[in-house]
Amino acid sequence: MRIGFGYDAHRLAPGRPLILCGVNVPSDFGPEGHSDADAPLHALADALLGAAALGDIGAHFPDTDWRWRGADSRVILGETYNLVRLAGYALSNADITIVLQRPKIADYIERMRKSVADTLGCDAGQISVKATTEESMGFTGSGEGISAYAVVLLEGLQ
Ligand code: MG
């Protein structure tokens, strides 16, 4: 078994879509980035790569590459998981935490779990998505940005 950890943060800007774990959450602002800037999926992809010691998301999906401009991060996550499986591992479970002051995203959590599970071809029971704020402190608290953390456990394929 292998454990992996991932982290990501993006600046929030007016007029950008707020896409979290592949789910479009109604909002008048969203994260800036080269792809769709889905911070929790980027954290999850980095956790998967970390668990398999395959480098990081920036090495595999560079923001200088036009292919990932405006990309749906579910594609990045799916391609990442293909690399992990080729290396001989399968996901046991993943636990994601999204840190965002507003809007409230509790009503979208179940859809996010299903979105991640569908992308990885696993059961939603293997995917946890949690949300928290930082109590108005720091860059997430001020609304300047969003951050996300993910941990995964991989099992070796026999
Ligand atoms: Mg990112």
Image (tube, helix red, strand yellow):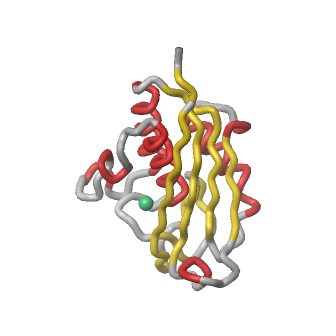
Q: Height in image: 18 above or below 47?
A: below
Quarter of the figure with the N terminus: top right
Instruction: Locate residue 6, reporting x and y percent.
Output: 50, 53
Looking at the picture, does residue 78 appear above or below residue 151?
above
Pinpoint residue 57: horizontal percent, then vertical percent. 38, 50
Closer to the camera in the image, 8 or 29? 8
| Residue that sits furthest to the right in the current view | 107
Residue 130, image quadrant: bottom right
Residue located farthest toward the top when viewing the structure as drawn = 158
- Relative to 2, residue 21 above or below: below
x and y percentages locating residue 5 in the rendered image:
52, 50
- Residue 112, relative to residue 99: is it above or below? above
Q: Residue at x 69, y 63 (%)?
A: 131
Q: Percent x, y for residue 72?
A: 44, 51
Closer-to-camera residue (155/110): 155
Q: How many marks?
A: 0
> Quadrant holding ligand 1?
bottom left
Q: Residue at x 58, y 85 (%)?
A: 142
| Left or right of 91 in this view: 10 | left
40 lies left or right of 93: left
Q: Quadrant of residue 119?
A: top right
Residue at 38% of width from left, 58% of height from top? Answer: 35
Q: Residue at x 75, y 62 (%)?
A: 106
